[in-house]
Image (cartoon, rainbow, N blue to C red):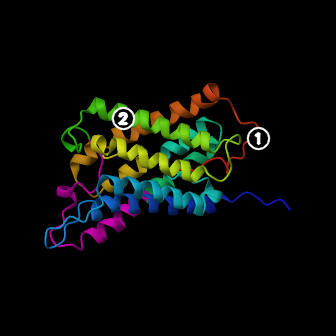
Amino acid sequence: MATSAPTMPKRVVAEFLGTFWLVFAGCGSAVLAAGFLTPAGVHLGIGFLGVALAFGLSVMTMAYAVGHVSGGHFNPAVTLGLAAAGRLPWRDAPAYIATQVVAGAAGAGVLYVIAAGRPGFDATESGFATNGYGSHSPGGYSLVASLVTEIVLTAVFLFVILGATDTRAPRGFAPIAIGLSLTLIHLVSIPVTNTSVNPARSIGPALFAGSGPLGQLWLFIVAPIAGGLIAGFTYAALLGQNENASPLELATAA
């Protein structure tokens, strides 16, 4: 018996849950656990590797949990890249993107409430897991270096998503490939930009961290979207096109 596709309200609820979890868990690992020191001065933090894994695991777990409902984008750059590749109708993109941005802000808001429960916490001073270049880059990397990093890594991320969800790929493993890809992306680029590749992930924390991150937010909107569109428009020409694509089965990720 054939089943009907999920309605748009169900799809945006799935996108909200997935994006909320991505921002809360991924940024939460950076804000709460990356550099944790005990009162005795013992470092028990998870570091860059732990943060990278947290982002990858957040996407993988929600892709399995709700990817069958919405496609599991959780990222405006992914939504636009999939639309460019013909995996999602363009008319559906605005609802997805609006939901992702709101969910990212909600995830960052809940994280702020928790983080502010520690005496002396200051979101502006700590950076609150925001993205940045120059003086706001963890390693002091320039605007150009940050721009190239975000465009290239988002494009690679979309190529992984499009390839892993192609009907020619092994079925059922896409969330694992996508989650590990996002982990690897973070391992490469946390020192450069603190890793965005996702405008919703960047917008949420920036709302709570003052004028510095907000002033640089444009790059982390423009660059991931550019990378996503580059991959979306070129995937079929470079690697061929699946013949029997089902949009809700062929879209999972961060």
How many angstroms separate mark 1 from mark 2 (CA)?
Answer: 33 Å
In the foreground, 100 or 135: 135
In the foreground, 19 or 60: 60
Question: What residue is shown with label 2?
Answer: 149
In the foreground, 107 or 186: 186
Give the quadrant of residue 136: top left
Query: With 170 as the anchor, is 192 left or right in this view?
Result: left
Is residue 164 highlighted in magenta?
Answer: no
Secondary structure under the numbered disc 2 in the rendered image: helix
Is residue 112 highlighted in magenta?
Answer: yes
- What is the three-letter code of the residue carrying label 1? Asn
Q: Residues within 10 Å of mark 1 (few under 14, many from 20)?
A: few
Magenta segment boundaries in residue numbering: 104-132
Query: With 238 as the anchor, is 189 left or right in this view?
Result: left
> In this rendering, does residue 198 appear at all?
no
Q: Position of residue 247 (x, y in %)?
A: 68, 47
Question: What residue is shown with label 1?
Answer: 244
Q: Position of residue 206 (x, y in %)?
A: 30, 52
> In this rendering, does residue 83 appear at all?
yes
Give the quadrant of residue 5: bottom right
Residue at figure coordinates x 68%, y 59% from the top left: 7
Q: Position of residue 245 (x, y in %)?
A: 72, 42
Q: Residues within 10 Å of mark 2 (few under 14, many from 20)?
A: many
Secondary structure under the numbered disc 1 in the rendered image: loop
Residue at figure coordinates x 21%, y 72% from the top left: 118
Residue at figure coordinates x 29%, y 51% from the top left: 130
- What is the three-letter code of the residue carrying label 2? Thr
Mark carried by residue 232: none
- Nearer the N terminus, badge 1 or badge 2? 2
Marks 1 and 2 close (CB-CB < 8 Å): no
